[in-house]
Amino acid sequence: MVRSTGANASPAVSGTQSVERALSLLSFFTDEQPERRIAELVELTGLGQSTVSRLVATLESLGYLVRDERSGLHRIGPKVVSLAGIALNQSPVHRAARQPAQNLAHELGLGANVAERHDDQMFYLCHFEGPLAPRAFTLTGRLAPLHSTAMGKALLCGLTDDQVRKTLGRAYPAYTPHTITALDPLLEALQEVRTRGYATEIEELAFGRACLAAPIRDRSGDVVAALSVSGSLSAMDLPNRQDSLAAKVVEQADQISTSLGFMAHARLGL
């Protein structure tokens, strides 16, 4: 709930709260609810209808929201997409990984993804569809859990057990019967990732889906991102293709790491 502004608030405070209110409106547009009516935003924010209408009109005039004339519903506007593009283009990982990920999707026909860790979730930096793994939407910009995904395990493998515990806390939601739902088995899985250099996931987040991911390291050797290929169980065919897919993904992840300044021989003291 957004707090109301007092009648005696100073202009600076009032201006700051107007910005907070406007940004809070944008946060209510989600994958589940990509379009909103003014009345919905009034209910969600607890603000008056005149205030919400004024803020929405301002956001619309600036291109942050657009209104469908037929339905009267508002949705995220092109200005947000433009800013997102600027943010992505400023990411060293995105710049280094975009082409290798696209090449993987083209060569293997699978989905190829790059993500980094944001606190206790992973954030998709880029996503490409192959003909064997089509999607009607992009994963770029979406968040996903760490404990139930191959990319999440690849991102966590660079942390110590204590760091994993502090990062994830005690909540391990189950998305399918195959999801890891406790710390100890997750730590065992992460040790396996460190040993073989890649992570796998079979129906841990969603039924009928599989994924294979490898960590990406920066100049210091820290895991800063992960690269994966994903698709349906039949398209991935891990029982028969795991070794060959792992070789491809690890090779491309290593190339991205090298682009970010990582030198494996220096880290090993050779």
Image: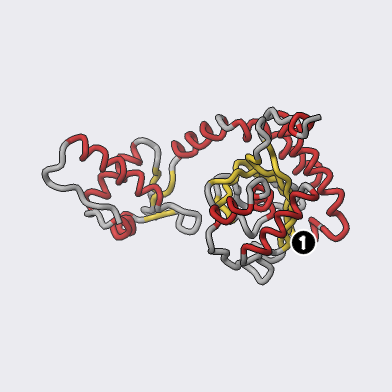
State the quadrant of the N terminus. bottom left
| Numbered marks: total | 1
Q: Is residue 110 above or below residue 39?
A: above
Instruction: Residue 64: give x, y in percent of width and height.
Output: 40, 40
Image coordinates of residue 154 in percent, x first then y, are 69, 49
Image coordinates of residue 150 in percent, x first then y, are 69, 54
Residue at point 58%, 50% (across, down): 163
Q: In which quadrant is the C terminus drawn? A: top right
On the image, the x and y values in percent for residue 247 come to 84, 44
Q: Is residue 172 left or right of residue 184?
A: left
Q: How is the image coloured?
A: secondary structure
The amino acid at mark 1 is Leu
- Which residue is nearer to you in this view: 158 or 83? 158
Identify the residue at image location x=49%, y=59%.
32
Instruction: Look at the numbered disc 1 and give the secondary structure of its residue.
Output: helix
- Which residue reaches farthest left? 8
Q: Nearer the viewer, residue 26 or 196?
A: 196
Mark 1, Cα crowd under 10 Å, few <14 / some 14-19 / many 20+, is: some
Residue 70 visible in image: no
Determine which residue is flagged by label 1. Answer: 233
Q: Residue at x 60, y 41 (%)?
A: 125
Residue visible at 21% across and 35% down in the picture: 12
Query: Is any atom of residue 191 visible in this view?
Result: yes
Residue in the foreground of this view, choosing between 9 and 156: 156
- Tell me which corner region of the image, top left, top right, bottom left or bottom right, holds residue 264: top right
